[in-house]
Image: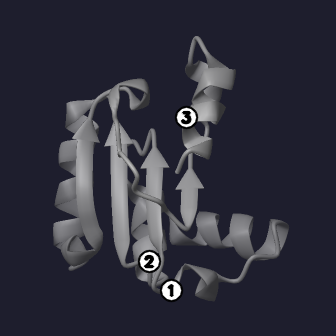
Amino acid sequence: MEVMRENLFSLRLKLPKRLFKGTKLVSFGCGTGEYELAYAMWGCEELTCIDMNGISIDRLRFLFQHYGLAHSLKKTYTKSYFDVDLGAERFDFVIADGTIVHTEDPLGALEKFGHY
């Protein structure tokens, strides 16, 4: 999991892992949270994770607890990201890995993500 994220960010996008240190991140369509664990391992301090599948969110919470990273998991939502309102909250990273193509309104999703 962490290796896959590291390959993407460090090798392909040329973004060092240290960029995540001390950051706030929101993940739209986080699934079971394996990638989000990598962000927390790299020093992301506050993660907000959103997924429609309650079983996936339960697994995410379990994994964060199991790996001693529950302190980085700020909020979780079991909803469509179109139904979540994060208000005026802002994030250093907005992640929507592989989820936009599965929506009925990809442009609406991008517009929503741009608010954060």
Note whether residue 107 is visible. Answer: yes
Q: Nearer the viewer, residue 87 or 70?
A: 87
Q: Residues within 10 Å of mark 3 (few under 14, many from 20)?
A: some
Disc on res. 112: 3
Residue extending farthest top: 104
The Cα atoms of the two marked residues, 3 and 2, are separated by 22 Å
**Which residue in the protein does label 2 denote?**
44
Query: Which of labels 3 and 1 is toward the front?
Result: 3
Q: Nearer the viewer, residue 104 or 63?
A: 104
Q: Indicate the position of residue 27 as horizontal and vertical percent values.
A: 46, 50
Q: Residues within 10 Å of mark 1 (few under 14, many from 20)?
A: some
Instruction: Give me the residue at 43% from left, 25% from top.
Output: 82
The Cα atoms of the two marked residues, 2 and 1, are separated by 5 Å
Instruction: Give me the residue at 39% from left, 42% from top.
Output: 31
Note whether residue 67 is visible. Answer: no
The Cα atoms of the two marked residues, 3 and 1, are separated by 25 Å
Residue extending farthest front: 88
